Image (cartoon, rainbow, N blue to C red):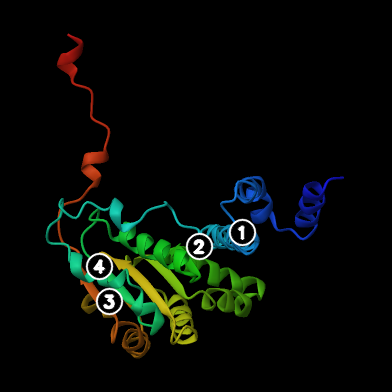
Amino acid sequence: MTRAHQLEASLRALRLSGMLDTLEVRLAQARSGELGHLEFLAMLCEDEIARRDTAAIDRRLKAAHFETTTNLEDYDFAFNPKVPVAAIRDLATLRFVEVGESVILHGPVGVGKTMIAQALGHAACRRGYTVAFTKTSRLLADLAGGHADRTWANRLRRWSRPDIVILDDFAMRDFTAAQADDLYEIITERAGRSLILTANRAASDWYSLFPNPVVAESILDRLVNGAHHLAMQGRSYRPNKRPRRPDPAAGR
């Protein structure tokens, strides 16, 4: 076995696949004089670090359960000039995550609230933060299931761990007393960690959705005060994506 083959076997045994993948290229650079001994080793280490970073990002993106892969560059701000571009780009710096603040994106159907929320989530995953994306109804259904099978505490802890939880379609309908209690527990448990909410209604319209005004005040005081509120006004993208109806005259 040659030394190169021995090195490959050692890298494989140590599970250093980033080094293994670029070994031939780095050896060729070393043989040609492009890399000295220390540079050769440094480049191999950098290759391994890059592979691990990429693998970690992929794991975080998979764990987030996003509906789509997107980033802010995919959003057509020119289509809806009333959308607060500067505020969204400021949120993309993720300073709000560093200080544990939340974000509320509200506006009519189809303007891209979910897309912006997921774009912020993707940016956070790439920066090293953990994210969970879900429809609000699914979160509440998951916690309700925990009451039924006595796993509620475990489910609550799972939703409390991520650096960011994105609750899509918040405040679409009235909450039951049990749902309001679960929301209170989630928000209390996540104190100091960020939420991103998308909603068709502004936060000032949420109080009437809760059956108990005391619980509503407790939830919304923690959730609304201190959050970044972005009103996303404009036209819906969705009519442009609907399939066109066939023209009856075309077949004549």
Of residue 70 and residue 145, the one placed in the foreground of this image is 70
Callout 3 amino acid: Trp
Q: Secondary structure at mark 2?
A: helix
Q: Comparing marks 3 and 4, which lies closer to the viewer?
A: 4
Nearer-N-terminus badge (1/3): 1
Task: Please identify, in this view, whether the residue under mark 1 or under mark 4 is nearer the observer.
Answer: 1
Q: How many marks?
A: 4
**Along the horizontal axis of the image, is 90 left or right of 67?**
left
With respect to residue 145, does 112 lie above or below? above
In depth, the one of 171 and 27 nearer the eye is 27
Residue underneath mark 3: 206
Q: Are marks 2 and 3 in contact (CB under 8 Å)?
A: no
Looking at the image, is mark 4 or mark 2 nearer the viewer?
4
Looking at the image, is mark 1 or mark 4 earlier in the sequence? Answer: 1
Mark 2, Cα crowd under 10 Å, few <14 / some 14-19 / many 20+, is many
Find residue 64 and name its label.
2
